[in-house]
Image: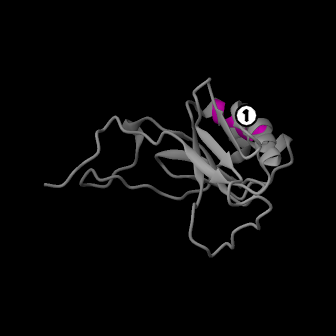
Amino acid sequence: MIYTADPGTTIGHTHLKVSDLDRSIAFYRDVIGLELQQTYGTEAAFLSAGGYHHHLGLNTWRSRGGPRPAPDATGLFHVAFLYPTRKALARAVANVLAHGVTLTGAADHGVSQALYLDDPDGNGIELYCDRAPQDWPRDADGKLEMVNNRLDIDALLAEA
């Protein structure tokens, strides 16, 4: 028998190795808008939205002062932050841009609208909102058919 995870299963949090804890706390707090929930000495921190114990962990246990990973190295491609509405996504992206952070990409995937950037350690970040499941593109057999179309960033930001 093939095991299938319970449909209520979600990804609870991501934990990143960073080179400078204070710099990373400031980035995820000020640019992404997460709230600092707790620090664990001077080597780890836990941040979240809405008072949850943590959506994101940061640590320097083996990475303090370390270099950015090479673009062709294995590892995390990106961590994705799901916003409940397009307006909430627009406000988040406006804040990112107000902090002078450069977007590395943007796409309309049919199922979602996403923007991409990097944190100070080169970890990829996706900020996105989903469309309603009934609006997801499907082929003639009903299978999901995601796309990689241009996202109109100016139209998104107009909703901020």
* Residue 26 in view, yes or no: yes
The amino acid type, in three-letter code, at marker 1 is Gly
| Residue 55 occupies quadrant | top right
> Whole-percent x and y of residue 103?
74, 54
> Whole-percent x and y of residue 149?
56, 57
Magenta stretch mostly in which secondary structure?
helix
| Residue 82 occupies quadrant | top right
- Above/below status of 103 relative to 26: below
Q: Which residues are magenta?
A: 88-95
> Whole-percent x and y of residue 124?
65, 57
> In the image, is 26 to the left or to the right of 72?
right
Q: Looking at this view, name the residue that lies furthest to the top.
A: 51
> Whole-percent x and y of residue 15?
59, 48
For the point 39% across and 38% down, the residue is: 133
> In the image, is 143 to the left or to the right of 20?
left
| Residue 102 occupies quadrant | bottom right
Q: Looking at this view, name the residue that lies furthest to the front.
A: 41
> In the image, is 85 to the left or to the right of 4?
right
Q: Nearer the viewer, residue 77 or 75?
A: 75
Q: What residue is shown with label 1?
A: 33
Q: Looking at this view, name the residue that lies furthest to the left.
A: 1
Asked if the magenta segment contains residue 93, the reply would be yes
- Above/below status of 147 relative to 26: below
- Above/below status of 13 relative to 159: below
> In the image, is 91 to the left or to the right of 11?
right
